[in-house]
Image: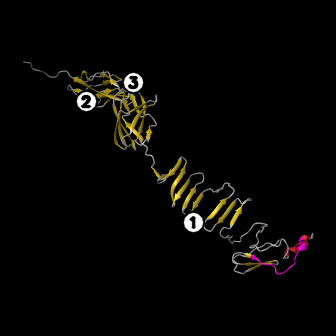
Amino acid sequence: MPTINFPSGPSLNDTYNLGVRTWKWNGDAWALQPLTGGFTGSQGYTGSAGSQGAIGYTGSAAPNTMSDLVDDTSPQLGGDLESNGNSIKLPDSATVFLGTNQDMQILHDGSSSVIKDVQGNQLYIQSTNFNLANSSGLKHIYANNDYGVTMYYQDSAKLETTSSGVSITGALTVGGVAITPATVPTISSISPSAIETSTSTAVTITGTNFTSIPQVEALNSSTGIWYPADSIAFTNSTTIVATFTLSVNASYKLRIENPDGNAVLSSSALLSVSAAPTFSTSAGSLGSIAGGFSGTVATLAGSSDSAITFSETTNVLTNASQANCSLNSSTGAITTTNLGGSSTTATTYNFTVRITDAESQTVDRSFSISTSYGATGGAQFN
């Protein structure tokens, strides 16, 4: 069968001929013109001879004669339909049907453009990245391949799915009620971090989003028992002071709950409760020793429920220009190679020593060491 190849860019009433058939451009389509004569060809179609069939095709009365494409209610294609650069135009409400049962329909009803699945099946739109925008290009929905989906209002992102949930920019209204994001308190640090057993101690808690006046509790990490603070003082949104008297030696997590119910529990134990270190050595004078002495001056003693260390809080005992001694941080031994250093004058050296235990609890005690020197020169007695 000859190939129909309509010319592009036709003008009104242009004609196209193929064999004995003529088409005329009516402004919208190529219209097949009726034959004014020709062979009837009926015998050719019904006869067994192939040559008679060819004659029948050209006859106007042949049953399979190609008719006007515009007026034909059931035109058939024997191959691909090539537009040759021309458009395919359908009027309002004219529908393109896809599928054996016409499941998929595409049309424009005069006011709306419609893509419809009429059989209750699923409609898939598959793309690496998907954009839904208006005719001006302003985004409505954007789906990123293997990542999130973002919804827009006037090209401004408002809702986005993320690996951890949903991110919303702006206000969220549910049932006409504006939802205010929860303001959850946080804890960043406390001071002191260790307190003495059964001793009322004020603990300063630093964090964010505190509101007046929150509840503060200590959770024994070992037993799971909660202990409310004795009292709570609200300073500002980042600082509160909670006073505790805890009788059980343990490590404690802290929980803060604002009046609106939003709360935080520290992820780890922040507060340690234990017996404070103590000195066994009495405060005051450790004795009078000859200046220039070399050896152990004294040994300080103390204890706690954990390891302790000794240190001087003043700058006298271990100052080479003063007592000129050393303090052993583990044993508390005070030693010297030349007590008093270069001094030749009897002197009382006052100093303070601190014991610190493993929980960073401390105790201070004040001591003194006196030096003496033998008499020099003469004296007159009356």
Residue at 51%, 57% (x, y): give it: 157
Q: Residue furthest top?
A: 382
The residue furthest front is 175
Cβ atoms at labels 1 and 3 below 8 Å apart = no
Dot 1: element: loop
Mark 2 and mark 1 in contact (Cβ < 8 Å)? no
Tag of residue 322: 2
Q: Could you tell me which residue is drawn at 69 percent across and 56 percent down?
A: 119
Residue 27 is drawn in which quadrant? bottom right
- Left or right relative to 132: residue 371: left
Pair 3/2: label in front: 3
Of the numbered discs 3 and 2, the one sitting upstream in the chain is 3
For marks 1 and 3, give the CA distance. Answer: 77 Å
- The amino acid beneath tag 2 is Gln
Residue 35 image label = none
**The C terminus sits in image quarter:** top left
Q: Earlier in the sequence, mark 1 or mark 2?
A: 1
Q: Magenta stretch: residue 33 in it?
A: yes
Where is mark 3, residue-wise? 305
Measured Cα–Cα span from mark 3 to mark 2: 34 Å
Name the residue beneath numbered marker 1: 135
Please give the name of the residue rendered at 55% of the width and 60% of the height, measured from the top-left corner.
139
Q: Amino acid at mark 3?
A: Asp
Q: Position of residue 109 (x, y in %)?
A: 64, 67
Residue 89, relative to residue 36: is it above or below? above
Name the image quarter holding the N terminus. Answer: bottom right
Q: Which residues are magenta?
A: 31-45
Query: Mark 1 and mark 2: span between their CA atoms?
Result: 89 Å
Check the image and name the residue furthest to the right: 48
Classify 183 as above or below 45.
above
